[in-house]
Amino acid sequence: MADKTAHLALGLAGEDRAARHLADKGWRILARNWRPSGAARGLELDIVALHGDSLVFVEVKTRRVAGAGRAPFLRVPAYAGLTPAKRGKLARAAGHYLTVHDLWHKPCRFDLVCVEQFSDGRLTLEHHSNVIELRPVVGGGDAAWQPR
């Protein structure tokens, strides 16, 4: 139980750091840990923000960095958690958000914020924009992400 509590605390610290980072850049945070209701209740968006005119769905991946002496090439980067299955879940969650808030007309994208916590407690952050190409996720071929 203590491991799960520590894991949740680390995730929350990473999301807090990511939200502060975005707000410091002038982004407007619209929602955190947004979950749709009903049949889609297992989906979640970490952060939904407005950057200029674009709606940005931000996935936050937080990892602890291994102690000294471990070779850097053995580290599993935070972005490795953005698997194809996770991309699909994010696309479905975003679709629900756009529907619930009637925002299908807004330009939108998916960003990833990778947060690493070092043994001394400090957090570092990397922000990557446009991390998901949705055509393959939503059916491939000519499937459109947003109706026109």
Image: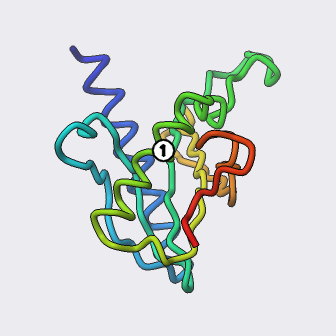
Q: Residue furthest left?
A: 38
Asked whether, in this view, residue 17 is left or right of residue 3, the answer is right
Residue at image mark 1: 90
Asked whether, in this view, residue 9 is left or right of residue 48, the answer is left
Label 1: few (<14), some (14–19) or many (≥20) C-alpha neighbours in 10 Å: many
Work out which quarter of the rendered image holds the C terminus and state it: bottom right
In percent of width and height, residue 123 lies at: 54, 47
Q: Residue at x 51, y 38 (%)?
A: 62
Asked whether, in this view, residue 49 is left or right of residue 97, the answer is right
Q: Nearer the viewer, residue 45 or 5?
A: 45
Mark 1 belongs to which amino acid?
Leu
How does the figure colour the protein chain or chains? rainbow
Work out which quarter of the rendered image holds the N terminus and state it: top left
Asked whether, in this view, residue 101 is left or right of residue 81, the answer is left
Q: Residue at x 65, y 57 (%)?
A: 127
Q: Nearer the viewer, residue 99 or 2?
A: 99
In percent of width and height, residue 91 lies at: 50, 47
In percent of width and height, residue 86 lies at: 52, 33
Q: Residue at x 25, y 26 (%)?
A: 5
Which of the 4 quarters of the picture holds residue 136? Answer: top right
Q: Residue at x 62, y 22 (%)?
A: 66
In percent of width and height, residue 84 lies at: 62, 30
Q: Is residue 70 above or below residue 109?
A: above
Q: Nearer the viewer, residue 63 or 128?
A: 128
Q: Nearer the viewer, residue 29 or 96?
A: 96
Q: Is residue 11 above or below residue 130?
A: above
